[in-house]
Image (cartoon, grey):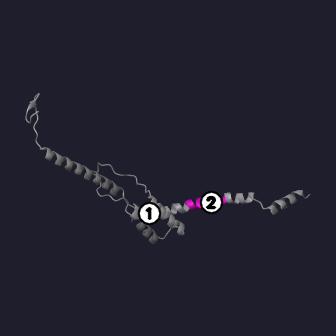
Amino acid sequence: MAEGAAEEGVLCVKVMTDEQMEVLRSQISAYATVCEQLVEMHRTMTAQQDSFSGRVIRLADPPSGGAKISAKQRWTPTAVQVRMLESMFYHGNGTPSKQRIKEITSELSQHGQISETNVYDWFQNRRARSKRKQAFAAPSNTESEAEEESPSEKKAKKEMHLQP
């Protein structure tokens, strides 16, 4: 169909050249990519905890009619952070000092989001887990030791039962 020709009462006119359409498509695509990145960055920054105070940082508070995040997001350590924390726990003795917690937080923040509160709580929880495991393992050790008698103990018991 020729430009400007009418077909069944519909008039078709090109207002942009093919080159202009291609430029517009690429601009729309770039805009969509930037928008997606901004949305993701906003989500990350909104959920990110301030490593010093543990409060949530917000770049832009939603308007009064907007939805607010009411529940505090839970911290999930990365695999690298867990390995580093486990190593520090194994080589250390209990929960570190406030200054050491600041240093640990600084080191771990290179491998993902973390706050001093997260570090402190992790050490407290790990210590409690360790104590539970020790308490659980201790009774089973004493039972197995009681079951295993030396030959001299067995002989002594037999002699006691044989005596009138």
Look at 32% across and 53% down and name the residue there.
40
* Circle 1 Cα neighbour tier, 10 Å, few/some/many (<14 / 14–19 / ≥20): some
Look at 52% across and 66% down and name the residue there.
89
- Label 2: which residue? 135
Task: Single out the residue that lies furthest toward the right.
Answer: 164
Q: Amino acid at mark 2?
A: Ala
| Percent position of residue 94, x then y | 53, 67
In the visual, does 33 lie left or right of 130?
left
Q: CA distance from mark 1 to mark 2?
A: 27 Å
- Tell me which segment is drawn in magenta: 129-139
Identify the main secondary structure in magenta.
Answer: helix
Above or below, 43 against 109 in this view is: above
| Percent position of residue 118, x then y | 45, 61
Check disc 2 and report its element: helix, strand or loop: helix
- Label 1: which residue? 117
* Quarter of the figure with residue 10: top left
Q: Where's the N terminus, which quadrant? A: top left
Look at 54% across and 66% down and name the residue there.
90
Q: Amino acid at mark 1?
A: Thr
* Quarter of the figure with residue 81: bottom left
| Percent position of residue 2, x then y | 9, 34
